Amino acid sequence: AQTVTQSQPEMSVQEAETVTLSCTYDTSESDYYLFWYKQPPSRQMILVIRQEAYKQQNATENRFSVNFQKAAKSFSLKISDSQLGDAAMYFCAYRSAYGNKLVFGAGTILRVKS
Amino acid sequence: GAGVSQTPSNKVTEKGKYVELRCDPISGHTALYWYRQSLGQGPEFLIYFQGTGAADDSGLPNDRFFAVRPEGSVSTLKIQRTERGDSAVYLCASSAPRLAGGTDTQYFGPGTRLTVL
């Protein structure tokens, strides 16, 4: 079974600075998708970024980018120019290309200081 | 269009009671998922529907949990004889399969917080 590990329960960043959230995963499959979701106190899970494992190029969405290291099974999220609205719980998630369910990590709470 | 909606937003019930949680997916999304999120943890998969049928119910913890999607749109998660350990946020998500021109990315609703006293 696949597992996702987020080793940082909590992170803090100063407004306008850059922060990196870590995620590692375990799988024997070669074809899969990885995601970062943001969950603010409203509980609404919002997709931040998505990466297909067959793509070597790291995904980027505005201030959010990932460092995808397939051999190391690592998928970190970098948030540049952090804003107060970025404060939330961030979840890393895995989905097999042959399945449908998402497997989530335990999450990292991101606090943004003004 | 409108996103995934879930009702009620909060539900408080007593141990042993029966509860129903409702999910309205994004219009046109044929795939629907239920997850359970306990306090301080990531969501855990419960069940996946493709159309009206449950394609994967491997995450349902026991036979007290049941879900339906009779017309391929709205889904109801049903919990019988609730226990205190069932207290959690129940999240619903929907997606449009790639064959239908979608990206199969799952879009989530705001969840229902269930508290069993």
Image (cartoon, helix red, strand yellow):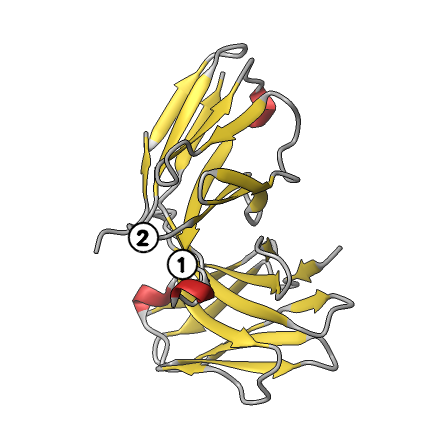
Cα–Cα gap, marks 2 and 1: 7 Å
Q: Left or right: B62 with respect to B78? A: right
Looking at the rendered structure, the kind of residue marked 2 is Gly
Q: Which quarter of the figure has residue B70?
A: top left
| Residue at screen point 64% across, 22% down | B63
Determine if residue A17 is in view. no
Looking at the rendered structure, the kind of residue marked 1 is Ala
Whether tag 2 and tag 1 are in contact, CB under 8 A, the answer is yes
In the image, residue B41 lies at what x, y percent? Answer: 58, 46
In the image, residue B33 lies at what x, y percent? Answer: 49, 45
| Residue at screen point 60% across, 62% down | A95
State whether residue B45 is above or below residue B67. Answer: below
In the image, residue B27 lies at what x, y percent? Answer: 28, 50
Mark 1, residue position: B96
Q: Which mark is residue B28?
A: 2
Q: Nearer the viewer, residue B113 or B46?
A: B46
Between discs 2 and 1, the one toward the N terminus:
2
Q: Chain of mark 2?
A: B
As helix, strand or loop, the secondary structure at mark 2 comes to loop
Residue lying at the far right of the rendered structure: A28
